[in-house]
Image (spheres, rainbow, N blue to C red):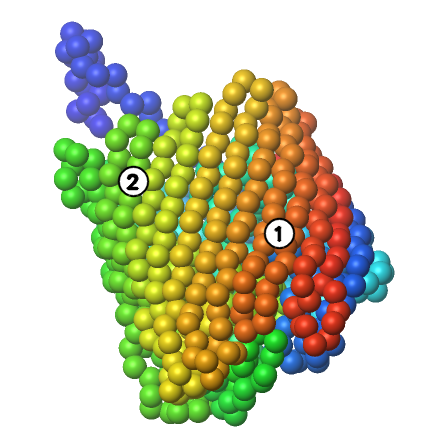
Amino acid sequence: MLFAALALCVCPVLVADAPSPAPSPSPRALGLRTATNISLTLLDQSSRGPGQSAPESAGFIAGSPLAPNNPYDLFSSAAQTPGVAGLGQLISTATYGFAGFDASLSAGLGYVRGSTTDAAYWGESLMPTINPHVGSLAFPYQIAFPTHAGQDDGTVFRASLLSGSLATADGNLRLKAGWFDLTQTDRFVFAPPALTNANPAIGFAPAESLTNGLPGLGDWSPYATALPLHGLDLLGKRGDATLELSDAALPSLPGTSARQTMGSLVLDRGEGTRFSAQLEHVTTGGAPFLTTIPSGTGPAYLDSPEGVLPSSTLSGQRQTIAGLRAAFHVVPAYALDGILEVGRAWYDATGATMPGTNRPGGFYHAGVVKTQRRVTASLDYYRMEARYATIILPYGVAENQWSAAFAWPGQWLKSNYQLVDNSALGVNRQGYRFRYYVDGGPFEVHLEYTDLHQIEPETRVTAEQEGFVDGYYLPQFPDSATLGQQKRYGLWAAWHPSIGDLTLDVVDDTLYRPFAAAHPEDRVSYEVPQAVLTYARHVSPSVVASVGLGRYAMKGAFDEPIDFAQRVFLTGVEIKQSAKSSLLLSFRRSTFGGLPTAPLAGVSPDFAASLLTLEQRFAL
């Protein structure tokens, strides 16, 4: 820097001919600085109809693995129950800049009063120390399907120290303690547990949407996009390399625990060239728990309306996953890029039906991407074997995910999550995905076609082996085993005339598995069409309004006939009131109807729900 300064003084002619130097970075602030986010949310939901009290509800509350099909919102998996709730949350971070390092602390205040179900599912993700989805017992929530407001009311207030950190002045070394989000991770090795609440918004989309984003102001986004981890996280940088080491607790059920130790090394050369390696080890402990796979102790098979539903008790699980990833330019002159991902997983458990039957599972992904002006086309091949990343990790509360056997998309049956991202394909699947995107300009379009096939048959023998999981089908008898197929079609189209933005979002999943005549309970043949039409308009730079219509349906058979649909109407407005405050107001109306999901019970699944959301935000 000294020589550069001398050159500027001595050689003004040369400087005039040279490119302008980049502006110097602002000097690092010393002393105390603070940042505070406040959200105040009012939720008012009403519902009615016989579908509020599904025939499986009482048994499910008592611990039965057979879960009710409704009342759940099919787009978000959030429970739709009547009640009024108020939420107030404040998260504040104080940082003190010393000459050589920064020290910071984050603390929060959380207050909830009213319907615990609505607060847990339709407000902002709660502060971790009161969030039932990460296993907190401070929140007075229990599984319930109230039919009238006031039946599930509760109150909680808590002040908590959430996290602290120390970082060198240049940011190349940082230690976090408490609740934290990872800085880097390859999602085929580890993906943080997804939120199980539906954050307030003025738009919605199918879970497998190809959208560029929901309507709204650019500075209005969810405070959290995944559930946080709790423990220690160390980040170090040198040149192009970044190393992150963490030891943390994962979200788990009360009385159980799940702990992860992980390290990742990333070498980022810039301009899309990136190489990484990642290794993690996860263990579970605490009380054994009942789950819907038969590989644990005491396997049982229940004849349910969706087929033969397995269950067993798991404890003392251990999972190790290693992965390598490379993103690179295949032919730079033609803007052709490539990606390779390889993962390997090992699983073991203390309690197992067939001990010693575990073996490694693999994940493989190869893809190419071609970009030319507004167009991006990609072709990917995936293979996720039936023993890859198959540790069972229950969290939150049992109805976190809409959990009927034919639920799709869903992370798993019931409230379990997988350690890795399964949005492209689930476990025990292989196949290819083609995407074609046209971005920018007055008209945009995204297209996708995915074709996936089951790798191994899921039978009452394979399903009882340690670490074997199939996320969507149910076990068959070995002498009548077949292989299933899944196809996915996706379309997102946007038109941007002067009067606003009009978008159409369509996803259609089809699942098929042939069956032997002697076993009609193995029948799987249905489709899941989902569509959302949205109109949004920026009334001014500080005001955006939108209105959307959506439909999520299922039709076909999963042992029993399936024919039902949910229709959703959502409208709302976001207002940027000042540099430090914003307001959201939305109204959502949904109706659900079709054939009973438990035909022998004869109870209609029809119900309707209306939700009014008002949220005020402050950034101080």
Kindly give the residue lying farthest to the front in the view shown. 517
Q: CA distance from mark 2 to mark 1?
A: 31 Å
Q: Is residue 23 visible?
A: yes
Residue 346 lies, in percent from the top left, at 32, 77
| Disc number placed over residue 526 in the picture, else none | none
Amino acid residing under circle 2:
Ala
| Residue drawn 61% across the image and 47% down it | 551
Amino acid residing under circle 1:
Ala
Find residue 502 and report its image quarter: top right
Read off the residue under disc 2: 377
| Residue drawn 42% across the image and 49% down it | 489
| Residue drawn 38% across the image and 87% down it | 479
For this view, does 536 lie left or right of residue 245? right
Q: Nearer the viewer, residue 350 or 519?
A: 519
Residue 230 lies, in percent from the top left, at 51, 64
Read off the residue under disc 1: 198
Give the structural element (helix, strand or loop) at label 2: strand
For this view, does 115 lie left or right of residue 199? right
571 up-or-down from 380: above or below:
above
Mark 1 surroundings: few (<14), some (14-19) or many (≥20) residues within 10 A: many
Task: Compare marks 2 and 1 and give the one earlier in the sequence.
Answer: 1
For this view, does 185 lie left or right of residue 92? left
